[in-house]
Amino acid sequence: MYLPSNASKARLNEAENARKNRSEIVKALSQGQVSRRELIKWGLFTTAGLLAPIRGLNPFVSSAFGSIPTGFPSSPLFGVKPFSQPMPRPDLFQRHGNVLTFLNPVPQAEANQTLQAVDPALGGGQGPIEGRPPGPVWAHQRFHLFPPRVAVAATQKGATTNFTYNPGVPSHLNSGILPSDPIPLRFHPGLPTQLPTHVWTFDGTIPPKLLQARYGEPILFRHHNGLPVHVTQNGGFGRHTITTHEHNGHHGAENDGFTGAYFFPNQFYDYHWPFVLAGHDTVNVDATDPRAGRPNGSGGITKVPGDWHETMSTHWFHDHMFGFTSQNVYKGNAALLNIYSALDRGNEEINDGVNLRLPSGTNKDWGNLDYDVSLLLSDKAWDSNGQLHFDIFDFDGFLGDMMTVNLAYKPYIEVEARKYRFRILNGSVSRFFKIAIANALGNAVPMTQISNDGNLLPHPVTLTALDQQGIGERYEIVVDFSGVTVGQKLWMVNLCEHQDGKKPANELTLAEALSGKSADPCVGKFLEFRVVRKPLNKDVSVVPSTLIPNPDLSKIPVARERIFEFSNGGKQTSINPVTASVGPWGIRTNGGDTLDADFGRISAAPGFGTREIWTLRNGGGGWDHPVHIHFEEGQILARDGSASNVPPWEKGRKDVYRLHPGGSVTITMQFRDWGGMFMEHCHNTVHEDNAMLLRWEIDNGGAPFLKPLPTPIPTPQGVTFIAPDDILPTAF
Ligand SMILES: [Cu+2]
C-alpha cells in the first residue's frame, strides 16, 4: 500500500530512501548481477520470500514512524486532475495482405537459422536471426494447411512518440482525439514523458495496440526484439528477452509464447496464429454449418471447419518471459486482440440469422469499433520524477496507486445516448477489480455482462456490479446510455479494495467506494462517461437472450482427473539455473510435493484428443490465485465442490479461474487439434514469477512429437535442447 499524502515529512523521506535502496537491489536482480538464490543466501530475502526486515531497506516493516504497513510515497500528479484527458481508443495494428512480399525474409515452417553477428554485449559470435527453437519439434504445425493470409509486424522497444496512430474510428467517436497529432509516451499531457528505458511497448508507442483477426484467416505476427542489448539499460526493471503469449489462443505450442522459448535483442520470432475453431479435425469437418465461419467482407459468411460453440471473441497478448513476466507486462508488453466470426462479426446491422448483432457499428462489413470499445485497465506507480516505477520485493504482489485506462490516467470518454459494448481487460500485475457504473446521484446503473474471458456467455446476465475480476480476466458488458440525458456524466467505479497484493481485502458498496474514504487510492471513479449527443445513426444493435451455448462434452469419456493445489512453501528439486526458479509459491500436482517452477519439468501430459477433469485448489494461507490454463477453455463443473456455487456469469467457458482463499474450481477440458508444451500458472504475475507455474504438454498427437518433449535452452547464439529435468510420476 501507499503512504497517505498527509504522512509526515520524515516518514515520507524514510520511505523514499527505502525505495532508492530497494531499487538498487531490484536493478541488480533484473540485470542478472545477482540471483534470487544469492539474495536468499545473503539473508536479504527470508525463506518466506519476503525482503528481510532491515530498516532503511524494507518500508513494508514497521518503522519509528508508526505501524502502517506501507510502501512508497504516493506517485506525484504534478497538478493533474482526474477526468481531464480523453481516453484514447487502442491503436490498430496494420494488417498486410501481401504476406510474402511484406515479410522479408519470407516466413517458413521451421525457425529461420540464417546467421547474423551477435552484439558483443550478448556474447558476440554469430547467432540465428530468428529466436524460435529450431527443427521439426518447433516448426509451425500444419503451416502449409494454414498458410498465413495476413502479416503483422511489430518491434518491442523503448518509449517514443506515436506519429501513426490509427484508432479505426473518426475523431468524433474517439472523444475528439485527432489522430494526426503526435502522441508522446506519457500517462497524461500534464505528466512527464516516459524515458525509453522505463516503458517498453509494441513499437515503443501508446495507446496500447489492438489486432483485429478473423476465424480461418491465419495471421503471421513477426515480433522483433528491439530492446537494448545491454541488460542494464532497463530503468531498474524489465528483462530484454521476451516471449509472446497469445492469451488464450487455440494454436500450436510453438506459437503460444512458452516461457522458456524467449528470444534476444536483434532477433525476431514468427508467431503463426491460424485462428481455427476448436474441433477443426473432428466437428463440422466439411464446413457446412454457417454458424462456423468468418465475415467474408461483403455481407456473407466464409464457412470454416470446427465447432461453432468454440467461437471466441476477446483475447490479448503479452510477454511470458520466465521469471520476468510481471516486470515486462507492467513495462508495456500487452496488446489487445479481437477475433471476429460469423456469430460475432462486429456489424450490428447484418441480419442473416447467424450474426448476433452486438453493439459495434454498421460502416464496415466486419470489425466496426464505433460502439465496441476495448478498455485495458492497469494500476501504475511512478517515482518523484514521474518515471514508471516497479518493486519486486513484496512477493504477495505489486500494487500501483494510479489507475490507468488504455495507459491514460483516469480519462473521460465521450459517448452517444445508445448501447455500447465494452471489452474490459484486467491488465494489472496483482490487483483485482470489481466494477460498477454510477450516475451523478451515486446510483448504480445496470449493465449486461455478455462474456467472460474469451467467450460469449450462453445467456447474458444483467448486473449492477460485476464479480471480482482477476488479473488476465476479460469481462465484456453492454451499457445502454439511451436513457441518459445529453450533457450528463456517468462513471466507472472500482469497488475492490486492496491492502496488499495477496487478494482483495474488501468489496465496498458503491456509496462507500464513492465516499473517498478508502485508503486504497485505486478505489472509486476511474473512467468518466460523457454523454455528448443523441445517436448520429439509429442504434440497431441487439443483445440476444441466447449468445453462444457451451459445447456438449457429455458424450466424451473422461480420460483422467488431476488435482493442482496452489500454495506457498514450494520447494525446488531441479538444480538447472536456466529452467528452474525459486520463490515462496508453488504448485502441488496430484498429491505430490509443492514444487517451484521449472520449465524443464513435465507435470501433466494429457493424451491428444481426450477430455479430462482438473480440480484447481487454493492451498490456503489467505491468498487468492487467478489461475490461467493455456490453450483450452474449461467449463466450470463446480466451485468448492458444488455445481450450485457456479454463478450465471461463469456458466460459459473460461481460461482464468479465481480460486478465492481456501476455495477450489473443478473444470473439464479437451485437448485436440494441436500439440506441444503449454503452461498453467497463477496470473498474479508476481506469484507466477516467483515460481507458481508449471509445464504440461500434449505430445502424442503424431509426428514430430517426441514423448516427452525436449526442453529449449535459448542463447543469443542459438537454441539448444536438453532432456526434461523431471517428469512427475502421474504426468503421463
Ligand atoms: Cu497467485
Image (spheres, helix red, strand yellow):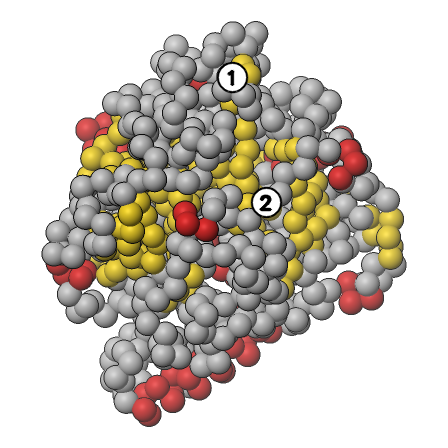
**Mark 2 is on which residue type?**
Phe
> Is 22 drawn above or below residue 379 in the view shown?
below
> Is 253 drawn above or below residue 691 in the view shown?
above
Q: Are marks 1 and 2 in contact (CB under 8 Å)?
A: no
Residue 500 tag number: none
Could you tell me how far apart the alpha carbons at marks 1 and 2 are, in whole angstroms? Answer: 24 Å
The residue carrying pointer 1 sits among few (fewer than 14), some (14 to 19) or many (20 or more) residues within 10 Å by Cα, namely: many
Is residue 582 left or right of 635 when viewed as pictured? right
At x 70%, y 58%, the residue is 226
At mark 2, the secondary structure is: loop
**Mark 1 is on which residue type?**
Ile
Residue 698 or residue 216, whichever sits in front: 216
Residue 411 x/y as whole percent = 36, 60
At x 59%, y 60%, the residue is 162
Residue 37 can be seen, yes or no? no
Residue 431 can be seen, yes or no? yes
> Is 378 drawn above or below residue 291 in the view shown?
below
At x 73%, y 48%, the residue is 268
At mark 1, the secondary structure is: strand
* Label 2 CB-ligand 1 distance < 8 A: no
**N-terminal label among 1 and 2:** 2
Which quadrant does the C terminus fall into?
top right
Is residue 710 left or right of 511 when viewed as pictured? right
Task: Give the residue at mark 1.
Answer: 301
Task: Give the residue at mark 2.
Answer: 93
Quarter of the rendering containing residue 399: bottom left
Quarter of the rendering containing residue 497: bottom left
Residue 469 x/y as whole percent = 32, 47
